[in-house]
Image (cartoon, grey):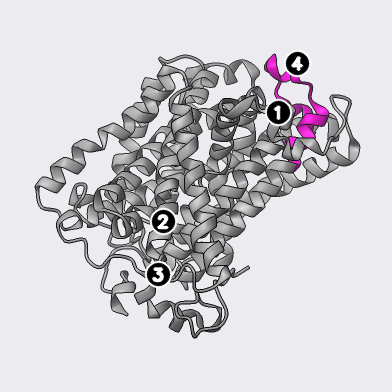
Amino acid sequence: MSEFTPTEGRGGLRANVLGTFDTIVMAVAGSAPAYSLAASTVALLAAAGLFSPAALLWCAIPMLGIAWAFNYLGRLDVNAGASYSWVGRALHPALGFAAGWSLVVSALIFMVAGSLPAGQYTLSLFSDSLSSNTWACVGVGAFVFLVMALLVLLGARITAHAQWIMTGIEVLILAGFGIAALIHGGSAAHFQWSWLWGFGHFGGFKGFAGAALVAAFYFWGWDVTANLSEETTDSQKNSGMGGLLGVAAVFALFEIVTIAVNMMVTQKDIAGGAPFLNTLGEAVWPGAGGKIMVLAVVLSTIATLETTLIQISRSLFAMGRDKTLPAVFGKTHARWQTPYIALAVIVVISLGLFVASSALGSVTKILNDAVAAIGLQICVYYALAGIAVVVAYRKVAFKSLRNTVFVAVWPGAGALFMGFLFVENCMNLPGIQIAIGLGALAVGVIPMGIYWAKGSEFYTNPGARLDAALADAVDAEFGSSSLTTTASHGGGVATDL
């Protein structure tokens, strides 16, 4: 059973500092509902129009399949590297590195995609002219980023406390204003049920793929719970459950607000650059509503910067520990037990990207390019995780109907969906977005080649492959709610919901 408890004997991260509620809050904060709506709704509406809620629904279904994959892979391997370790042990070490690297580069790009709007929205609370100044946005965004980096350095417990406040306020504002807007009604459009499932209104597979790629960015970030698994109590259960509940919660918020936007804000106003969340807020609470909605976006952006810093620092920590990147990344602070060197490197690189990005144009242009590039990258590691769970659980996948659904069909379909989005958008996105997305992934070949040649054990001796049929530890831990691993067992896959 010891081979399935990989955290034993490891030093470094502080264990058992996060509970069940913490993981749910982290998952919601990672997806950043208000930020995602503010940053990506214009792009989603451009791709899907009034059928944006349908695009979110069609993306949420396979995304939940990926969340199930993370849930069950996390039961076999508790590892801060999450998909990096799981894919490496279930499929191949090179694919594992590719999964880890895709998360690292997407998170680095997000440091710009998140920090610049953090500066912009913060400044908009005080001055419209300053909020349109890219350099001012860079300065304020960099300051916010540094504060979040300090909180991450101080440990997961402090980070969680900060998230309770920021994410709690954000969710209350979004839910309150969204529901109030639905009740109030609007003059832009009348609600239609076809908004929720209008698959035939995307303009073919090309249009659907473009809309779904943006929708995938909306959801991205919930998997921070997996990267925090070594710091979570009863992590084999709590990390996966937090991710699943987080995806369900943000989907509900996305649908409520997106439908409200359809009803309250005209397509013409959005195309003209109208601040639609402000419009939504003002319609519900004239005079103050717009500013309150902006406050929700500011809090959401800051919160998701924090969770993204956690994801990338823990991923680099795991890769440094395995010596697939410089081993110094695997060191943790003696007092706070956080990967401080990895965090310092992230800060330096990100600040450099802030300055470089200011020469690329407006915040809006930078954001649009970053969203598409990140969308391609997250498709890679989500798809690989979906394949990995099918392979790891292949010997028990057909022991019961529940097994078949939750560790084979649903995650497998999620992986195919992510693969479809990746291929289809590689053929249709503008060159600059493909260059950013694929170029950053291609750079990973260099460190992989270097550390493979140096004889990293991750490549030369990766250890036991993930195999649920051998993981009797799962049965022992979860009892009657465990996965069906033999024909004589009753029950099936636990939903834990």
- Which part of the image, by quadrant, shows the N terminus? bottom left
Query: Callout 3: helix, strand or loop?
Result: loop
Residue extent of the magenta highlight? 256-280
Q: Nearer the viewer, mark 2 or mark 3?
A: 3
Q: Point out the tag, 4 or 1, that comes first from the N-terminus.
A: 1
Q: Which residue is mark 3?
A: 395
Query: Callout 2: helix, strand or loop?
Result: helix
Say whether marks 1 and 2 touch (CB < 8 Å).
no
Q: Point out the tag, 1 or 2, that comes first from the N-terminus.
A: 1
Amino acid at pointer 3 = Lys
User: In the drawing, what numbered circle is on residue 227?
Assistant: 2
User: Label 2 to label 3, Cα distance in Å?
Assistant: 27 Å
| Image position, residue 290 (x, y; %) | 75, 30
Q: Nearer the viewer, mark 2 or mark 4?
A: 4
Query: Callout 1: helix, strand or loop?
Result: helix
Name the side, left or right, on which 468 lies relative to 418. left
- Label 4: few (<14), some (14–19) or many (≥20) C-alpha neighbours in 10 Å: few
User: In the drawing, what numbered circle is on residue 201?
Assistant: 1
Name the side, left or right, on which 31 lies relative to 95. right
Compared with residue 248, is residue 428 higher up or lower down, i.e. above or below?
above
Q: Nearer the viewer, mark 1 or mark 2?
A: 1
